[in-house]
Amino acid sequence: MENWKPAAPTPSDLGDRELPQLSDALAGKQIALMVSGSIAAFKTPMVARELRRHGAAVTTYASRSALRYVSAEALAWSSASPVITELSAEAEHLSDTRPFDAYLLAPATYNSINKLAAGIADTVITSALASAIGRVNQGNAQLLIAPAMHGSLHNPIFEASIERLQQLGAKVIPPRDAYGKHNLPDEQTLVDAVIEVLG
Ligand SMILES: Cc1cc2nc3c(=O)[nH]c(=O)nc-3n(C[C@H](O)[C@H](O)[C@H](O)COP(=O)(O)O)c2cc1C
């Protein structure tokens, strides 16, 4: 490799957090990016940025476990919005003053999928998604779920929960299967699925 002769980058009109727009497919859409505690959470700032490249406004929710694998600061920077890591008197789980068009649970853990299917609402993610299921049921929102986990967690409990959630109107984005794991699909695949369900 040759020595690099230092040269300043070409100036840009874009602000630090702004992104070049790829399309307006999600213009005006409010998207909740729900990050649960799979190791694949470290990829989610790229998902937030890809959503924004298509015009979406992104609000990120992160579970306590998710914050072991991705920082709140990286999520806030990439989504250009504060990250919801705790529920407060603002009742962030309901988000009724600014309803979401779609909720994207990516990565979706075994834990959060099963809790959601069982009607448990005891984390930032499961509380907000309990409300999401109500909105899906009323035809006011879309819920997309992208499971990511080791193959040993693909058990009958998981299968029954996935079936139940699909009956309830959730759309499951098939994982990218490799090396005995359900892996999180790349950010373009996730965002294409959001664009598809929002028509
Ligand atoms: C290093 C590490 C990686 C993990 N990756 C996954 C994963 O990919 N998928 C999964 O379902 N659980 C994974 N877990 C387990 C979850 O973090 C754990 O079940 C947690 O309770 C999930 O909480 P949440 O669903 O509230 O985020 C992992 C745990 C560790 C320690």
Image (cartoon, helix red, strand yellow):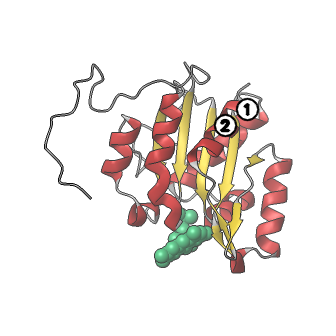
The amino acid on which the numbered mark 1 sits, given as a three-letter code, is Glu
User: What element does badge 2 sit on?
Assistant: helix
- Between 42 and 178, the one nearer to me in the picture: 178
Residue 126 is situated, as x and y percent measured from the top left of the image, at 59, 54
Q: Is residue 63 visible?
A: no
Q: Mark 2 touching mark 1, by CB under 8 A? A: yes
Check disc 2 and give the amino acid type: Asp
Provide residue 22's location: percent of width, then percent of height: 53, 25
Q: Is residue 162 above or below residue 99?
A: below
Q: Image quarter for residue 54?
A: top right
Identify residue for label 1: 196
- CA gap, disc 2 and disc 1: 6 Å
Q: 144 above or below 180? A: above
Total marks shown come to 2
Q: Is the N terminus in the top left, top right, bottom left or bottom right quadrant?
A: bottom left
Within-10-Å neighbours for mark 2: few <14, some 14–19, many 20+: some
* Residue picked out by circle 2: 192
Residue located at (18% from left, 49% from top):
4
Q: Which is more toward the observer, 142 or 146?
A: 146
